[in-house]
Amino acid sequence: MRLIRVYLNFFFRYLRFYSSAVTEYDIDSPYIYRFLREVVLDNRFYAAFRRIESLRASLKNSQSMLSVKDLGAGSQVHFNNRRRIAALVRVAAVSPAQGQLLFKTALWATPRGILELGSSLGISAAYLGLADSRTRMLSIEGCPQTARQARLNLDAVGAGQVEIRVGSFAEQLSGALETLKYVDLLHLDGDHRKEPVMHYVSTCLSKAGPNAVFIIGDIHWSEEMEAAWAALQQLPEVRGSLDLFHFGILFFNPDLLVRRHYTFVPWRYKPWRLGIFR
């Protein structure tokens, strides 16, 4: 019964998202439109994708067990801390489309430093780290066994330069920021509570440049995360945002003279919406 409620709530949150979404034909911000065309709607395939998805396929067949330590809001699907790697990669890892978006964002933003809060099995870190191996990247994971598996996975796909630190975000964040110096790309996908999310984003802003892009995972995961997303959009440093349902993306570029916030789906999901209705 609990799972049914979880999925029903998720379905209704998606309906609200979809009903308010616009398409690329409605975007009147050149900066955000360029991001859409060059990242979200870009269909180029890179060799790194094949390596990562080959790893994912092997993990889906793994029967190895991990003792998972949840430091955030916990799972809505799993109710014990002993989980198979195969189950984790299906539920907790980013999808291929989401991973490719992370990869292309890292190419687009040319960040001086990348910070990820929530390594999980390292799939998202692999997509971020393989975009440009010269970029300094650090990923924080609260669960020691999961972090150990993520390290093995990153090495397997050639992303050995990505550093993983084990511990809570609260414990590790200040040291990570001191190490990185810059956080021009943030991927936050390891805590689904409003106040911590607000704290992590606000703290990382001190290291963000004008072209920084912050990607917040699972912004419709719960009512609390939806409240966090609404609050993040109102931060004075935020000049624009994109709600892609699974990801919320924050922009800080001063060229965005007028703040713009969009809920977005590609036009093929709303073929009747060609910019006529505002």
Image: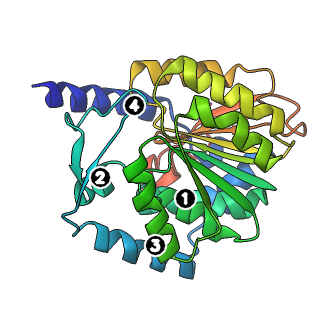
Q: Are marks 1 and 3 in contact (CB under 8 Å)?
A: no
Helix, strand or loop status at disc 3:
helix
**Closer to viewer: mark 2 or mark 3:** 2
Q: Position of residue 256 (x, y in %)?
A: 85, 36
Sequence-wise, which precedes: disc 1 or disc 4?
Answer: 1
Helix, strand or loop status at disc 2:
helix
Mark 1 vs mark 3, CA separation in Å: 10 Å
Spot the residue most to the bottom.
47
Q: Amino acid at mark 1?
A: Ala
The residue carrying pointer 2 sits among few (fewer than 14), some (14 to 19) or many (20 or more) residues within 10 Å by Cα, namely some
Mark identifier at residue 221: 4
**Residue situated in front as seen by the camera: 4 or 67:** 67
Helix, strand or loop status at disc 1:
helix
Sequence-wise, which precedes: disc 1 or disc 3?
Answer: 3
Q: Residue at x 58, y 20 (%)?
A: 230
Q: Residue at x 51, y 68 (%)?
A: 154
Q: Position of residue 116 (x, y in %)?
A: 60, 47
Q: Position of residue 229 (x, y in %)?
A: 56, 25
Give the labeled residue for mark 2: 88
How many numbered callouts?
A: 4
**Closer to viewer: mark 2 or mark 4:** 2
Q: Residue at x 72, y 34 (%)?
A: 174
The residue carrying pointer 3 sits among few (fewer than 14), some (14 to 19) or many (20 or more) residues within 10 Å by Cα, namely many
Mark 2 vs mark 1, CA separation in Å: 15 Å
Q: Are marks 2 and 1 in contact (CB under 8 Å)?
A: no
Give the labeled residue for mark 3: 52
Q: Amino acid at mark 3?
A: Ile
Q: Are marks 2 and 4 in contact (CB under 8 Å)?
A: no
Quadrant for the N terminus in the image: top left
Give the labeled residue for mark 1: 125
